[in-house]
Image (tube, rainbow, N blue to C red):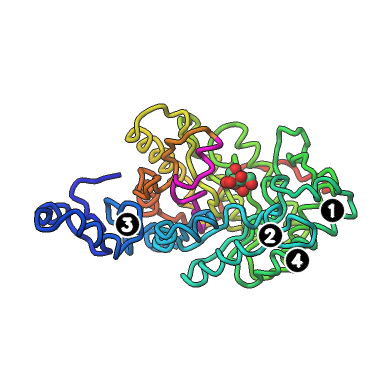
Amino acid sequence: MRRRGTAINLTNKAVSRRTMLAGAAAFTFASWLEGCRASVPPHHAPAMDIGGSNSLRYHAAAQQLLFGCAVNAKALREDAAYAHLIRQQCSILVPENCLKWKAVEPEQGRFRFEDADAVVAFAEKNKIKMRGHTLVWHEALPDWVERGLTPTDARAWMTAHIQNVAGRYSGRMHSWDVVNEAIAPRDGRPDGLRDSVWLRTLGPEYIEIALRAARAADPAALLTYNDWGLDDEAAESEERRRAVLTLMRRLRQRNVPIDAVGIQGHLYVPNQRGYGAGLRRFLAALRELDLQVFVTEMDVDDSRALTDEAARDAAVAQEIGAFLDTALPDPAVRAVLTWGLTTHYTWLKERYKNPATRGLPFDDTLQPTGGFAAIRDAFDRRKILAAKPQQVAPLTPIRKWR
Ligand code: 9MR
């Protein structure tokens, strides 16, 4: 995303394009390169000013929001430019993979905390908040869990896992994705719950067991239910929202600790469905249940946008703008995280066989994309609704828990 006449941030000082061109003859390319190396980490320096008061974290904070991203632990260790960008842009981080069960407890009782410890230490050193992701999910499970689950073991193993993992970072996490992706109306259950290994072994109560264990392990963390497919106006998204609300109401009725819902926000283009009343009603209903909302994993699959870079940028920007403009006015929304910061490290490339993706705020060379500008502009446009009770769509009748 290049704008005419914007500043070029080469040495952490803003230098106008004209000044740079005028001075270009006065020094050699080699001396210029040397100067850049001394002041900024490798990769290209951004072509627009994105630091300090121009950063996403700053624009988010002005609207009482946190901005952050999923972080790749290995890249954080090895790529100084990436680490620099994270420090500059983020007020909250979530490890993309290293706190998943398979990564953190590959064998029963043997924990690997090195990567997560390093991410948490980085965050604390830089005064960045941390989210944990994720304690109970049907994916990223080690073989020993999948192989051996009996109802007795499942309960004991899940509780021990949560005690060990959430307990290790107790008091240091802003929030935890305690249960991830438990809704799947397509599986045909009346309560909309996914027919997962946890549900089959423990019944719907597994969600409650996990949340209670998480509260005991880390009483300060905001306990979050996190899911995808909750954003647009498609009929299936509305069905998924309804199932989440039904679950949240049951949890409240049963006094189960729950503080927040994570709307993942994996968007795609082109998407004719748009964002509107369904999402707004969902947010209002969550707020009335006294739940906070985090946009936890926003990115845009642009694999079907078979066009050039500028057209992809425009499509991604439009989609992000439309989604955030619908979500951000609700005061329940407290944070926006993207699933990755730069397309240099993203699951989108592999998953959608799309090496040219522009679906994150920064591209492969750490230049801001159309998505960067769209997020920042959407933050600037935020007008928080007065938190008065809203007209909420009737919910699916509450069924018996078991
Ligand atoms: O981006 C993650 C990818 O690297 C992993 O291989 C995958 C399986 O663990 O999970 C991806 O992240 C997912 C997240 O944990 C939950 N919501 C969907 C994300 C994208 O698939």
Position of residue 166 in the picture relative to residue 370 (left or right): right
**Which residue does the image show at 32% across and 57% down from the upper left?**
50
**Which residue does the image show at 78% across and 36% down from the upper left?**
189
Query: Would you call the spot at circle 1 few (<14 residues within 10 Å), some (14-19), or many (20 or more)?
Result: some
Amino acid type of the residue that numbered disc 2 sits on in the rendered structure: Ile
Amino acid type of the residue that numbered disc 1 sits on in the rendered structure: Ala
Q: N-terminal of the two: label 3 or label 2?
A: 3
Q: Which residue is mark 3?
A: 50
Q: CA distance from mark 4 to mark 2?
A: 17 Å
- Could you say which disc has been placed on residue 198 in the image? none
Instruction: Please report contact status of discs 3 and 4: CB closer than 8 Å, yes or no.
Output: no
Magenta-colored span:
334-351
Q: CA distance from mark 3 to mark 4?
A: 40 Å
Q: N-terminal of the two: label 3 or label 1?
A: 3
Q: Which residue is mark 1?
A: 154
Q: N-terminal of the two: label 1 or label 4?
A: 1
Q: N-terminal of the two: label 3 or label 4?
A: 3
Front: mark 3 or 2: 3
Q: Nearer the viewer, residue 370 or 22?
A: 22
Q: Which residue is mark 4?
A: 163
Q: Which residue is mark 2?
A: 258
Q: N-terminal of the two: label 4 or label 2?
A: 4
| Local SS, label 2 | loop
Give the tally of numbered discs: 4
| Local SS, label 4 | helix
Q: CA distance from mark 2 to mark 1?
A: 21 Å
Amino acid type of the residue that numbered disc 4 sits on in the rendered structure: Gln
Q: Is residue 339 magenta?
A: yes
Front: mark 4 or 2: 4
Q: CA distance from mark 3 to mark 1?
A: 47 Å
* Image x and y of residue 304, in percent: 47, 28
